[in-house]
Image (spheres, helix red, strand yellow):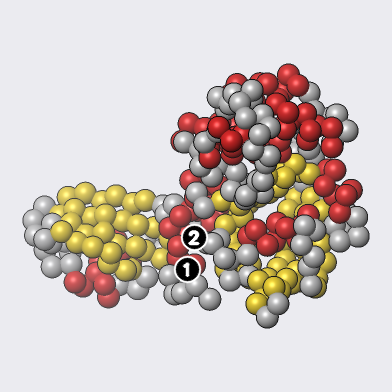
Amino acid sequence: MSETFAIKTEGLIKSYGSFQALYGVDLEVQKGEIFGFLGPNGAGKTTTIRCLLDTIHRNGGSVSVMGIDPLKDPVAVRALVGYLPGELSMEANQTGEKLFRYFNQLRGGKAEWDYIREMAKRLDLDIKRPVKTLSHGNKQKIGVIQAFMHRPELLILDEPTSGLDPLMQQEVLRLVEEAQSDGATIFFSSHIMGEIQAVADKVGIIRAGRIIEVAETSSLIGRSLNRATVRFKQSVDVASLANVQGVTVLGHDDGTSVTVQVEGEMDGLIKALAGFPVLDFETQRPSLEEIFLAYYKDGTD
């Protein structure tokens, strides 16, 4: 396994009885990058993460986390990782502060209390309150802090902003970016396209236990797919635009405007519009969410 990779899987397979959850997952996450892991519920995101940490045993393939096979030495792997599970179980009667002291003891006292207090302040978390009195969002903040508190080399975060309001979501993303600036690698799953688009260097899309795309975020968004809105000086018949190669009519408004999706070059659309009384022409690149949904438009298997 190359030392340039924080995470590398080859042919990762996992089954639960007769149900196969992962079908030969191949991933490469470079050290120092932020890797966004996308997929709907049941696609295999959490199963992949659990195999990375050996909280569940894989059935086949190879896995390397920071150069270590988690199946052979899970303790060594977890010592290098800050992990936020999708569902964090905490003792209800303990306060946030006592939980942080417990986690810090497990990690050999590596965390700095000034850093813990700073994160609690930034996330507006009262660490003196018992867990049972906290909202779902505040419990999530405890999970975030425990993952970051010892400044790990690798952060594995399963839906890190779940249950947080938009301001706190942005604060968590700032923590992610700061961790990367300090040299950490971040691997995180999310349903929120905007946050992955905002911070991820690379995106992996998983569908029904198979990786269907891995690419740089900018490359995905910059693909040759555009949306164009054309407004006309007067009502016209836009039906002929649907016959232009690469053009799909998405909608029109009484013939005075039309919205189309253009795959490939814009030249055909521009030439077709030459015979129309065009008032205004506006193009827009697709969002990461639109690209993601395009992978699922034909089904979920």
Q: Can residue 70 be seen in this view?
A: yes
Q: Looking at the picture, how far across and down is residue 147, in whole percent?
A: 71, 38
Q: Looking at the picture, how far across and down is residue 67, in whole percent?
A: 87, 53
Asked where in the image residue 273 lies, by quadrant, the reply is bottom left
The residue lying toward the viewer, choosing from 76 and 291, is: 76
Q: How crowded is mark 2: few (under 14 residues within 10 Å), some or many (20 or more)?
A: some
User: Which residue, given by chain and number where applicable, does mark 1 sit on?
Assistant: 296
Left or right of residue 146: residue 216: left
Residue at 71 percent of width and 35 percent of height: 146
Left or right of residue 105: residue 233: left
Q: How far apart are marks 1 and 2 (CA)?
A: 7 Å
User: Which residue, given by chain and number where applicable, does mark 2 sit on?
Assistant: 292
- In the image, farthest residue toward the bottom: 18
Confirm or deny contact between disc 1 and disc 2 (CB under 8 A): yes
Q: In which quarter of the image is the N terminus?
A: bottom right
Which amino acid type corresponds to the residue marked 1 in the rendered image?
Answer: Tyr
Which amino acid type corresponds to the residue marked 2 in the rendered image?
Answer: Phe
